[in-house]
Image (cartoon, rainbow, N blue to C red):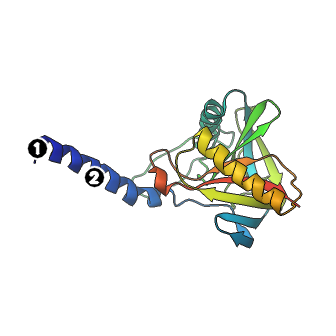
C-alpha cells in the first residue's frame, strides 16, 4: 500500500479521533433546564424554566447574521462589560480588568421581522441585577418566564437545507396534532464549529400554549 496514502489516512484518523474525544469536553457547559412533557422519535414537548438571555439583533442572511451576533455576544461574555472586576484564579495566575461570564449552550437564532435575533442564555448563577451590563449598546439583557416549546432535535451541518427539512417536519407534526403556536421558529445550536456533523446537536423550537 502507498506510504503517502497510509500517512494521509493516519492524519485524518487522528483528527477525527481528536474531535470525538475533545468535543464532549468543550461542549460540557451549562444548558437551560427543562422538563420533558412528552416525546415521539426526535420531537419533544418541553417546559423550560425561567431564564435570562443576552440578545442582539442583526440584519442580513442567516449565516452572516449568526456569525456577527455570536461575535458581539462572545465579546460581551468574555469581558467587554461594565463590571471592571478583578477575578482571582487558580494557577496559572491571570489578572483581568473585566468580569468574564461563563459560556452556556445553546446559541439561539430567531427571525424577527427583517432582522435576526441572536441570543446567549446566561448562567443560572446570575440574576438580572447581578449580570454585568454590556458596553455594547446593541446588546440587551432580558428575563424570560417559563415557557412551553415543541422541539425537534437533529444532527448534521447547520445548512439552510438541513434546517428547512427539519422545520418542515416539525410544522407538519404541529399541524397534524392541532397545536396552537405562539412564536416563529427558533434555531438552537449546541456545539463548537469543529464538531463532526454526526455528533452535532441542533434544534428547532416553537413556543406553544
Label 2, label 1: how far apart the Cα atoms are = 17 Å
Cβ atoms at labels 2 and 1 below 8 Å apart: no
Q: Is residue 48 among what the camera can see?
A: no
Query: Of circles 2 and 1, which is in front?
Result: 1
Residue 71 position, x and y percent, is: 59, 35
Q: 147 left or right of 41?
A: right
Residue 4 position, x and y percent, is: 13, 41
Q: Under tag 2, what secondary structure?
A: helix
Q: Is residue 152 among what the camera can see?
A: yes
Count numbered badges in the picture. Answer: 2
Residue at left offset 74%, top offset 49%: 53
Q: Identify which residue, 148 or 28, lies in the foreground.
A: 148
Q: Residues within 10 Å of mark 1 (few under 14, many from 20)?
A: few
Q: Which labelled disc corresponds to residue 98?
A: none
Q: Identify which residue, 41 or 64, lies in the foreground.
A: 41
Q: Under tag 1, what secondary structure?
A: loop
Comes first in the chain, label 2 or label 1: 1
Residue 46 position, x and y percent, is: 75, 66
Disc 2 target residue = 13
Residue at left offset 42%, top offset 51%: 93
Disc 1 target residue = 2
Q: Residues within 10 Å of mark 2 (few under 14, many from 20)?
A: few
> Could you tell me which quadrant the C terminus lies in?
bottom right
Q: 2 left or right of 19?
A: left
Residue 107 position, x and y percent, is: 64, 48
The quadrant where residue 150 appears: bottom right
Residue at left offset 58%, top offset 53%: 190
Vertical order, 71 against 19 (above or below): above
Q: 113 left or right of 25?
A: right
The quadrant where residue 201 appears: bottom right
Amino acid at each position: 500500500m502507498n506510504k503517502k496514502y497510509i500517512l494521509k489516512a493516519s492524519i485524518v484518523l487522528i483528527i477525527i479521533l481528536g474531535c470525538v474525544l475533545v468535543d464532549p469536553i468543550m461542549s460540557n457547559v451549562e444548558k437551560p433546564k427543562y422538563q420533558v412533557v412528552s416525546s415521539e422519535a426526535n420531537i419533544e414537548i418541553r417546559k423550560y424554566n425561567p431564564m435570562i438571555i443576552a440578545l442582539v439583533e442583526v440584519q442580513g442572511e442567516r449565516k452572516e447574521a449568526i456569525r456577527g451576533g455570536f461575535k458581539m455576544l462572545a465579546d460581551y461574555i468574555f469581558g467587554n462589560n461594565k463590571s471592571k472586576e478583578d477575578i482571582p484564579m487558580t494557577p496559572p495566575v491571570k489578572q483581568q480588568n473585566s468580569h468574564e461570564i461563563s459560556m452556556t449552550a445553546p446559541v439561539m437564532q430567531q427571525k424577527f421581522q427583517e432582522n435576526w435575533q441572536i441570543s446567549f442564555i446566561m448562567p443560572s448563577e446570575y440574576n438580572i441585577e447581578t449580570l454585568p451590563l454590556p458596553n455594547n449598546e446593541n446588546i440587551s439583557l432580558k428575563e424570560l418566564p417559563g415557557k412551553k416549546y415543541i422541539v425537534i432535535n437533529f444532527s448534521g451541518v447547520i445548512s439552510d437545507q438541513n434546517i428547512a427539512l427539519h422545520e418542515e417536519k416539525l410544522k407538519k407534526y404541529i399541524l397534524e396534532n392541532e397545536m396552537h403556536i405562539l412564536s416563529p421558529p427558533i434555531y438552537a445550536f449546541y456545539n463548537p464549529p469543529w464538531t463532526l456533523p454526526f455528533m452535532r446537536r441542533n434544534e428547532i423550537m416553537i413556543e406553544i400554549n
